[in-house]
Image: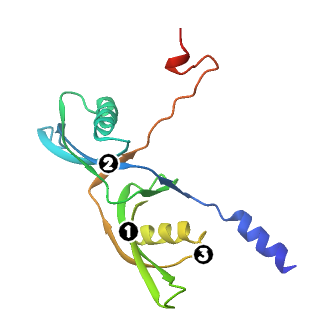
Amino acid sequence: MHLEILMTILSRKEITMRSRTANWFECTVRYERQMEDGMPKKVNELYVVDALSFGEAEEAITKEMTAFVSGEFEVKNINPAAYGEIFFSENANDDRWYKAKLTFITLDEKTEKEKRSTVTYLVQASTFNGAVKNVEEVMSGTMIDYVIANISETKTMDVYEHKFTAKSADDKPEFEQE
């Protein structure tokens, strides 16, 4: 009886988070935006892209921004991100990005002492408390002990993941092409 109730509860719980590990780059873009009063204003905005190199990051942010910015824009800065993993939310209201530092606690088998290592993640949420909840939701699937050392809101406007293109049956490597 208890097992049936537990299975029903677990089946109803929807996981609204997904995690993605990649090479992330933070890109600062400068462009002219129309303000609420109708006046144009130059703004700098931070975006995150999934790329393998600085050149690919610039290409990706240029492609993404072209769709949203009318007029000229400039990629002012590109830096490798301090995080390698991002926790994405499927909730449409989660429109902010938080940097979360987690401290993982492991036991050194030789010395029998606790060892702590800190890892930084980017987390999508609508509020600070939502970010904590989202981190806990993702981490609930792991067995490792952790402590949330810090969570702070970032200026990140959006995150763009690499878009994979489907290969067709006649795709061949260059060395096999005639």
Q: Are marks 3 and 2 in contact (CB under 8 Å)?
A: no
Going from N to C along the chain, the mark reached first, 3 or 2, is 2
For residue 25, the mark is: 2
In the figure, is residue 175 to the left or right of 155?
A: right
Disc 3 on helix, strand or loop? Answer: loop
What is the distance, in whole Å, between disc 2 and disc 1 at their CAs?
A: 17 Å
Badge 2 crowding class, 10 Å Cα cut-off, few under 14, some 14 to 19, many 20 or more, is many
Q: Which sits in the foreground, 114 or 17?
A: 114
Query: On the rendered structure, is 148 left or right of 91?
Result: left
Which residue is the site of mark 3? Answer: 143
Residue 130 figure quarter: bottom left
Q: Which is nearer the N-term, disc 1 or disc 3? A: 1
Q: Residue furthest top?
A: 178
**Three-letter amino acid code of the residue under disc 1:** Ala
Which residue type does callout 3 highlight?
A: Met
CA separation, marks 3 and 2?
29 Å
On residue 100, the disc is 1
Looking at the image, which residue is at 29% across and 36% down? 55
Q: Considering the numbered disc 1 on the image, is that residue within a helix, a strand or a loop?
A: strand
Front of the two marks 2 and 1 = 2
15 shown above or below 66: below
Which mark's residue is nearer the viewer, 1 or 3? Answer: 3
